[in-house]
Amino acid sequence: MFVASDEFVEAAAAQGKSLGFDPAVCYVPHPIQDRTDAEIRALADAAFEEILSQIVAP
């Protein structure tokens, strides 16, 4: 399972296909690097349940 910004949906799919790897993914809104700490926390809070459900899924 990995987390990436939604700018990389196509790139992640292509990379996964070329490697034969199909992990669970959680995409968050792009961009990341210029966000404030509060904005990053809000993104993490919004994605938390999806991430948790993916890492505990059988």
Image (cartoon, rainbow, N blue to C red):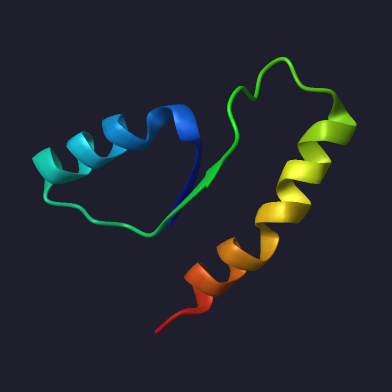
Residue 39 vs residue 22: left or right?
right
Point 21% across, 35% down: residue? 15
In x, y percent, where is residue 30? 58, 27
Taking the view exactly as shown, the residue that stands out farthest to the right is 38
In x, y percent, where is residue 14? 19, 35
In x, y percent, where is residue 12? 30, 37
Point 89% across, 34% down: residue? 38
Residue 15 vs residue 39: left or right?
left
Taking the view exactly as shown, the residue that stands out farthest to the bottom is 58
In x, y percent, where is residue 48? 68, 60
Point 36% across, 37% down: residue? 9
Taking the view exactly as shown, the residue that stands out farthest to the top is 34
Residue 13 vs residue 43: left or right?
left
Image quadrant holding the C terminus, namely bottom left
Image quadrant holding the N terminus, namely bottom left
Q: Is residue 23 above or below residue 14?
A: below
Residue 23: quarter of image: bottom left
Q: How many marks?
A: 0
Q: Is residue 34 above or below residue 10?
A: above
Point 48% across, 35% down: residue? 6
Residue 26 vs residue 12: left or right?
right
